[in-house]
Amino acid sequence: MTNFFVRIVGVNRKQRLCFTTWTQEMSAPYRRCDRTWVVRVGGRKALAVGRYTRVLADEEEAMGQVFRPETLLPGKESTHA
């Protein structure tokens, strides 16, 4: 199994040309990438590239990371408003 991924994703038209964000799978094996590089390739499309660096235990932990990242990642600030 490879940990690298490349995907086409949707973005807001006003989003910067290049930026980093986090990515997480919402189905097994619940992998997470804390640094995903995203480059816009059109008005509402972008290319996301990254490498999954850890596996979350189960669906409950994966959902918790998405909806309550500040409570499950001590010492890390949430960048999502």
Image (tube, rainbow, N blue to C red):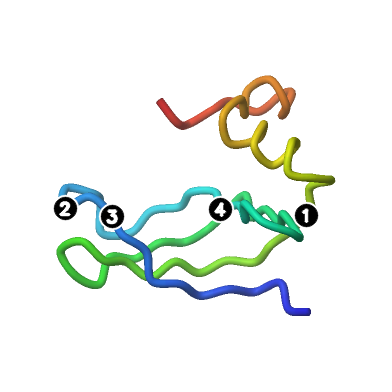
In which quadrant of the rendered image does the N terminus lie? Answer: bottom right
Element type at marker 3? loop
Q: Residue at x 65, y 66 (%)?
A: 51
In which quadrant of the rendered image does the C terminus lie? Answer: top left
Crowding at dot 1, Cα within 10 Å, few <14 / some 14-19 / many 20+, comes out as some
Task: Compare marks 1 and 2 and give the one earlier in the sequence.
Answer: 2
Crowding at dot 3, Cα within 10 Å, few <14 / some 14-19 / many 20+, comes out as some
Mark 1 — residue?
Answer: 54
Q: Which mark is residue 23?
A: 4
**Label 1, label 2: how far apart the Cα atoms are:** 31 Å
Task: Give the residue type that dot 4 points to.
Answer: Thr
**Label 3, label 4: how far apart the Cα atoms are:** 14 Å
The single residue placed furthest to the top in the displayed view is 71
Residue 33 rendering spot, x and y as whole percentages: 64, 55
Task: Give the residue type that dot 2 points to.
Answer: Arg
Task: Tell whether 35 sits left or right of 56.
Answer: left
Q: Residue at x 62, y 51 (%)?
A: 26
Crowding at dot 4, Cα within 10 Å, few <14 / some 14-19 / many 20+, comes out as some
Residue 14 rendering spot, x and y as whole percentages: 16, 47
Q: Are marks 3 and 2 in contact (CB under 8 Å)?
A: yes
Which of the two residues, 2 or 35, is positioned nearer the viewer here? Answer: 2
Mark 3 — residue?
Answer: 11
Task: Tell whether 33 sits left or right of 81.
Answer: right
Task: Compare marks 3 and 1 and give the one earlier in the sequence.
Answer: 3
